[in-house]
Image: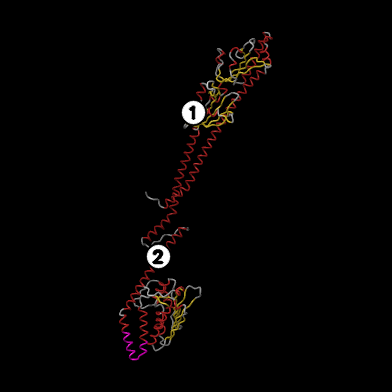
Amino acid sequence: MRAMNFSQKLVFAYTCIVVIPLFILVITAMGLIRSSRVEELEANSEGLLQENLEIVKKNQETCTRFELLVNSNGQLTLFFTIPERSNEDEIIETMISETTMLERTIETVPNIYGLRVFADNPNVPERWPIFMNSSRTNLKALNRWEFNYTADYLGNLGSLKYESVCTTRRLEKNHREIGYIQIAMKTSDFFPFLFKNINEYNNDYAYREVLNEKTNQMELIPITNEIIERANEPLSEKLFEEFSAEVFRRKQGELLPGGKVILKNNSEVRYSSWVRVPDLNIILLHTCSSEQIQKSLFLIQSGILIGLFITIFLLYFLVRYLTSRLMARVYKLIRGMKQVQKGNLEALVEVTGYDEVTEAQQTFNKMTEQLRSQIEEIRKEQQLIADTEMKAMQNQINAHFLYNALETIKMQAVIAGETDVEESINVLGKLMHYCLRWRVHTVTLEEEVDYIRSYIYLLNIRNDYVISLKTEISDECKKIVIPKMSLQPLVENAFFYAIEPLGKDAVIKVYTECEGPESDRIWLCVRDYGKGISEEKQKELMDYLADDTYERDSTGSIGLKNIQQRLTVFCGKEYRLVIESKEGEGTLIKIPVPRQFIQSEKGGDAQ
């Protein structure tokens, strides 16, 4: 598998830096949305349950008001107590007026399905379907509230025999039971919410709390009929068991008055709210299926995830584009390095921008330039060493023969008593020995000055005028290590170009100059007091020395250019010869050397 390059790693890293927090944010947002929707669903369930409870309480209160209406009717209750005290006309009139009054009252409350008043006194005449005798049905066996009740005792009055919610209560007069009042509402009017399905996700239920005589356990019995069964899907067995356990769970020894519960059956989840209605001995339940939010959450989450992936996709290509733009200059720099690695020192990179990469590009170009310069200097140094060794080898040819010949001439001069000849030969031998040590490339300033003295001595033998050598060199500077034959060529030039043309006594001065204790260099100076150099010639010489192009001296002599080349190799490019001259006053040539060379020791026979 191919490894990612740096830019790809950078794109991946930057994308992850943005995507990971974004992904965490999306997951958190999805969780918050889900939590919000669940809370909204639970609140909706609780709100609808409270509405249903208000409807039930309102219907319960309506039944209570009708009971009070009948109980507060003194004329009717007195009639039920002693009907025999009234004549037949009074009885008929009372029954007609009371029946009319109750019928009108029922008409004002459409929810009241039926109102029936039962008299215990058999002397009270019946006026159907309002007034009847208690013996018509077993009223004592009825609970205070009956659900799914049908008045079978009504005979052929089928329109009054619908399933209903019926409350049966005692009529009393002065704490004496005189009959019953029975108020009925259609089940669809008492529990209207059971007969309508808001949507496929919301369901309402009502259960009676009934004691099972066999198990002596309370059970929940659904309040239902065919219409309710068609309107609402019943709870599954497992969900019903969970709900029953919650309803009959006790807290601090008492049954819970209501609450929230999440009913789960495999993938089916219902967020539910329920409440106990003690007076009716029933439980109201409202459930909201999780499918209601699952579909909306799926759409929301799908939209968020699609948006996230589109964002990641666009972000990746945006980061990739910006990274490629930023890395293009870096790759140019890398390609330049590879060219240098292959040996192409002419490689340069285009400098663009104003940032760290720009600095790296400039540094690279400077580095290649310095490499080329250093390699050229090394080449020149090697060429210079090769030329110097070649010249030394040429000068060393027949060295033993010359020494032997000089020794023979010296012996002849001794025998003949020619002490001057003997001294001259000694000096010449010393000069030849100094020059022919070709393996030694550095000497001390003191050794170079001794050689110059010998050279001046020989010049004075051959001339009819005297050349004087003056030196002003401190003991400290005598130990400076310098390239061999650095000062002698300057003395030789002074003789040939400044002194010999005049043909009279002359002075050559060799001395050192120190710019100060903090200066990093010392100047080696050779001065003559000859005819001097014109400004044009002086400028020509300085331009000639300023040209660092290596120049091979084919004559075998050591000139100014050779001295400058060896000084550059030995000390560095910043160390340059200085020529100061005025016509008729003489010439001064100064050679700079590092002050640190004072502490250096003579290099012995360095190769």
Residue 535: image x %, image y %? 44, 78
Query: Which residue is more in the foreground, 173 or 500?
Result: 173
* Image quarter (top left, top right, bottom left or bottom right) of the C terminus: bottom left
- SS for callout 1: helix
Name the residue tied to disc 1. 238
Q: What residue span does the magenta drawing correspond to?
A: 405-423
Residue 406: image x %, image y %? 32, 85
Q: Can you tell which of label 2 and label 1 is closer to the viewer?
A: 1
- SS for callout 2: helix
Residue 439: image x %, image y %? 36, 75
| Residue 39 counted in the magenta span | no
The answer to whether one can see residue 544 in this image is no
Residue 137: image x %, image y %? 58, 13
Name the residue tied to disc 2. 371
Query: Which residue is more in the foreground, 20 or 547?
Result: 20
Which residue ends up furthest to the top in the rendered image?
Answer: 88
